[in-house]
Image: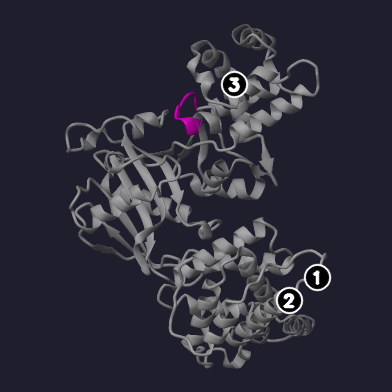
Amino acid sequence: MRVLRPSLSAGRLLLLWLRLPVRPPRPPGPRLSSGRAAAAGALERAMDELLHRAVPAMPAYGLREKTPAPAENQCADFVSFYGGLAEAAERAELLGRLARGFGVDHGQVAEQSAAVLQLLQQPREAAVLLQAEDRLRYALVPRYRSLFHYISKLDGGVRFLVQLRADLLEAQALKLMEGPHVRALVSSSRCWQPCGEGLDVFPSEGQRSPLSISGNERGAEKHVLGMVFFRVPEPGAGHLAFTVRSAAENQSEAVHPVKNWVDMKRRVGPYRRCYFLSHCSAPGEPLIILHVALTSEISSSIQTIIVKESPTSETEERDTITTAILYSLSLTQQGLQGVELGTFLIKRVVKELQKEFPHLGTFSSLSPIPGFTKWLLGLLKSKAKDHGRNELLTDSECKEIAEITGGPVNETLKTFLSSSEWVQSEQLVRALQAPLMRLCAWYLYGEKHRGYALNPVANFHLQNGAVMWRINWMADVSLKGITGSCGLMVNYRYFLEDTATNRTTYLSSKSIKASEQVLSLVAQFQKNSKL
């Protein structure tokens, strides 16, 4: 990981300790050699010294706005020390110590809570109670929050925090860090992200055209995001073309990977748009990318968007553009997982497209269905253990598939669907259309996690207020599409006048708004299947 490396004084001793050979803590067993144990102990002492010096103490409530910021070197020491930790276990150890020892002062929380309760039991002026509640809120702020606040002000500090959060999420997933203090640190890390108080829109010619947007949607630190807009850049067209070329070479587009410069040019040519958010600390580096196709109808196949040759005319016929298809949204930084940049970008893009095309009235995604094939194979495996009637398929479907494959339905389907070879049989593709369509509808609509849609892409769009509008057969015939979702894709349609209501309904009552096509497929599944 590349980090800031300012000149250090006191930090040099820490880095000398750091060069000693160490290994992550291990379960009880043979004791470490004396040299190894001494090195591990030196590293732990270095971590403790660093944290006590780098994490500023919380000033008293009355002095919170008068206390000077810590010296820049204190934050730079933490950045440099962390960057020198080569092993994930070492980084996890430092973050674990930070989480456990520099969080909320529970004594202060108890004291301020008691003060609020006492005031509630006695008639007091509202101002006194409100101030007591404000003191309680202040006591609930973890101490490490200020460290990250001041790091974000360093040159390159935001990029460091994004990578730090990625390390934190990885360590938690690998169970290198566990416990309530770690979960509190992970939860707090959502507030490190850059938030857009002001956005700048860069139009096709590359001329800077400021667009002021007031407000701070998440209430975190007010960093500046830039929304960059690509349209028909040619090689040699300056910074804009260089940025597009870099995006293609770096494979930033994760949903439908870009093959080369020609492929990227096709995706930003006529009837196509590409937007990304970047931060002022790294203006040419995308944080999240959104690709849009401008069409006359809601697309049912991704190949017509990313493979079809661009029109020969460089001039768009604006009267034919009635629909915007949001077909690819890619987060480029793992440390921004769980941060609502996608929602933020979609809202801004919709407003920009409405300004450019006032008559454009239809907004829809064409979304992949990651996890469907894996879920389906698991379902077939569990049903095979029942040794009874295949409840996922009708009798006629079982008979037809068995005649085509020449073997037991469950076993042959598991074999075929584990690869992409089944699409080479037109007979099998026709036979599987009806059952896979209704199984997919149930997976998207009926399979839940804590009451919400199990599929992460479905959950994202439903939380934004979209309608589960149409499931499309053989919509993505690429290897990734066939192996990941049996070639199926889904349109989530945004009826702008209803998105707020749909979002509230989904989040509060966990009710999914779906079209007649989807509900009909779900009903067919419920009639033919018993889960």
Q: Residue at x 61, y 78 (%)?
A: 144
Q: Is residue 355 left or right of residue 164?
A: left
Q: CA distance from mark 2 to mark 1?
A: 9 Å
Marked residue nearer the N-terminal end (2 or 1): 1
* Pointer 2 or 3: first along the chain: 2
Which of 21 and 90 lies nearest the eye of the viewer?
Answer: 21
Asked if residue 471 is positioned above or below residue 427 in the image, the reply reads below
Point out the stretch of residues depicted in magenta.
470-481
Residue located at (49% from left, 81% from top): 76
Residue beneath the point at 52% across and 16% down: 429
Q: Residue 242, percent across and down?
A: 26, 55
Residue 147, given in percent of the width and then of the height, sits at 55, 79
CA distance separating discs 1 and 3: 52 Å
Residue 474 colored magenta?
Answer: yes
Residue at the spot of label 2: 37
Specify the amino acid type for callout 3: Phe
Q: Which residue is mark 1?
A: 31
| Between discs 1 and 3, the one toward the N terminus | 1
User: Which secondary structure, mark 2?
Assistant: helix
| Amino acid at circle 2 | Ala
- Residue toward you, 317 or 227: 227
Checking the image for residue 416, the label placed there is 3
Q: Residues within 10 Å of mark 3 (few under 14, many from 20)?
A: some
Hey, which quadrant is residue 165 in on the image? bottom right
Residue 462 in the image: above or below residue 130: above
CB contact under 8 Å: marks 2 and 1: yes
Residue 166 pos. (x, y %): 55, 61
Residue 393 can be seen, yes or no? no
